[in-house]
Image (cartoon, grey):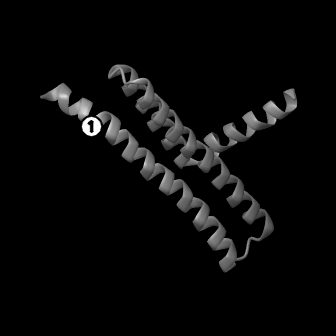
Amino acid sequence: MKKSFSFAIEGILYTLKTQPNMRIHFGIGILAIAFGFVFKIERSEWLALVIVIGFVFILEIINTAIETLVDLYTEEYHHLAKIAKDTAAGAVMVAAIMSVCVGLIIFLPKIIDWFF
């Protein structure tokens, strides 16, 4: 059981170290959490924020796994390999767009109220 956690943490750290987009998602996630504390968001807003941040992280990790497996299988161009990589990246993009929408729904009214 202890090894399983160790392997999982290694996978997360590998993704953070090697994937620039994961570092961007991580930074934006930390920023969103900080804004949550600054604006004292409601429990339901925290729930939505944590879910979308986690969803983006999960998909970025899965995307990394898929890309690594495809690269392990073939170094040559293959249209199915491209489809696998592109669709996995597309899933991350959809989640990231969704998280931006959730962030705007939560924070935009608070930012507007803060300035006006």
Quadrant of the image containing the N terminus = top right
Residue closest to the eye, 71 or 88: 88
Look at 51% across and 33% down and name the residue there: 50
- Give the left or right position of residue 72, taking residue 32 as reference: right
Look at 33% across and 40% down and name the residue there: 105
Image location (x, y in percent) of residue 60 = 60, 49
Kind of residue at badge 1 = Leu
Residue closest to the eye, 40 or 88: 40
Image location (x, y in percent) of residue 90 = 53, 62
Residue 73 position by quadrant: bottom right
Q: In the image as oriented, which residue stretches furthest toward the left?
A: 116
Which residue is the site of mark 1? Answer: 108
Question: How many numbered marks does the figure carry?
Answer: 1
Tell me the element at label 1: helix
Image location (x, y in percent) of residue 17 = 63, 41
Above or below: residue 64 compared with residue 73: above
Q: In the image as oriented, which residue stretches furthest toward the front?
A: 44
Look at 19% across and 25% down and name the residue there: 114
Binning the other alpha carbons within 10 Å of mark 1 as few (below 14), some (14 to 19) or many (20 upward) gives few
Look at 85% across and 26% down and name the residue there: 2
Residue 106 position by quadrant: top left
Residue closest to the eye, 4 or 45: 45
Residue 43 position by quadrant: top left
- Give the left or right position of residue 3, taking residue 57 as reference: right
- Give the left or right position of residue 108, taking residue 15 as reference: left
